[in-house]
Image: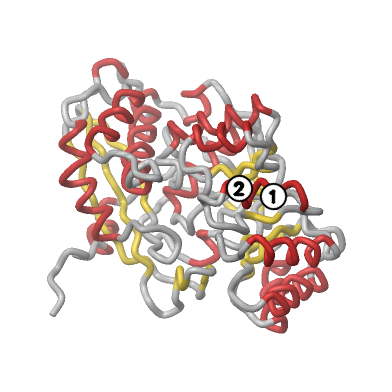
Amino acid sequence: MTPLRLPLGDLTIDRITTYAVALPTRRSFGVSGGAVAVAGRPSIRVLVRVDADGVHGWGEATPIPAWTYETAESIVTTVDRYLAPAVLGRPAWDLDGVDAAFDRAVNRGFTIGAPLAKGAVDIALHDLLGRAAGVPLGTLWGQRRRETIELGWVVSGQSPAEAGDSVAEGVDAGYRAFKVKVGLHDEETDTAVVAAVREHAPAGAPLWVDANQAYTVPAALRMSARLAGLQVAAFEQPLPANDIAGLRRLREASPIPVALDESLRHPTDLATFVRLEAVDIAIAKVQRSGGLTLSRRLCALAEDCGVQLMGSGLTDSDVGLAASLHLFAAYGLDTPVDLNGRQFVESPYAGPTVVIENGTARVPNGPGLGVEVDDAAVGKLAVDVLEQRS
């Protein structure tokens, strides 16, 4: 494909289109709030296409009601009825202005207000700008410190015996790092699952756990002591996102580092936790933070404040996967990241796309995100999530 290299200043947003697509599910996946993917049942993702003067870009939103409040239906209507009208006719390069327009269209509550929907449009604009310039996002940003990103194999919801089998599957696929979802059982079973992962993983393999806000402070303190004995590198989001006092107390007493995910909706949230000395590790997650624009601000703030960065995703298909890889490569993340989409869902709409070998992803080098989306395949996969149900 010949790079376009169009003048970025001349591009004006003239159309934004949403497609809810039903993707094949490879295996089941759950978090403490409930199911994320169910084997044998399609996984719904919302792809967003932004057009500007003959150039286009793609973004993705991953509705997970078990994790946060946005659904496939709400993402489609939010983009179609609120976000798109707010930015049509604006310069495509004005990412800061688009972010401000989004805040006027859907304002913040405790969160930044519909981050998954906003993130899909923001990602699509980045893809569009990279395609127009004929360069990958790292070149567009002037910042790319890595060419590959190591991924972690995710173990979720199993008994200790099933956890061992899952680890073996990951090892066979070439993975050398493992993330375990906890908070799905009682404390003893959660600990036994983590112990099984440690037992079956290669010696010295990086291992971290994610509770997705499942514990109380006393339970998290007990679990942190148990996990320390299993050489767990990080305890991700053990408490509810807004329990700042609890997280500060836990961080002071925990023998292992406390990482924050759901607590960091906006860069200002990270600033608050830094001032209160309530965070060890900041998790960068593109969709949670409303796209790449705010995610870059969060990563830069963490770096400037000396807070360790880790990376995560939302069981994204390949468009979202590529966006995260570009972000993590820009900031040189050298710890394994949880970008588990390929483990659980397929992306039949993608032609040339992200290459993953032996648990390591190559950062794409094509223009924009570096993922070629087949429009005809998107049309075949599209479903009407707003259709009235009897």
Q: Residues within 10 Å of mark 2 (few under 14, many from 20)?
A: few
Q: Label 2 to label 1, Cα distance in Å?
A: 6 Å
Q: Residue at x 52, y 71 (%)?
A: 29
Is residue 22 found left or right of 278 in the rendered image? left
Q: Which mark is residue 17?
A: none
Q: Nearer the viewer, residue 208 or 244?
A: 244
Callout 2: SS? helix
Q: Which residue is mark 2?
A: 245
Residue 58, image x and y in percent?
33, 43
Residue at 65% from the left image edge and 29% from the top image edge? 303
Q: Nearer the viewer, residue 173 or 121?
A: 121
Locate residue 50, reporting x and y percent: 25, 38
Q: Which residue is mark 1?
A: 249
Q: Pointers 2 and 1 in contact (CB under 8 A)?
A: yes
User: What's under tag 1, amino acid-wise?
Assistant: Arg
Question: Which quarter of the image is occupied by the N terminus?
Answer: top left
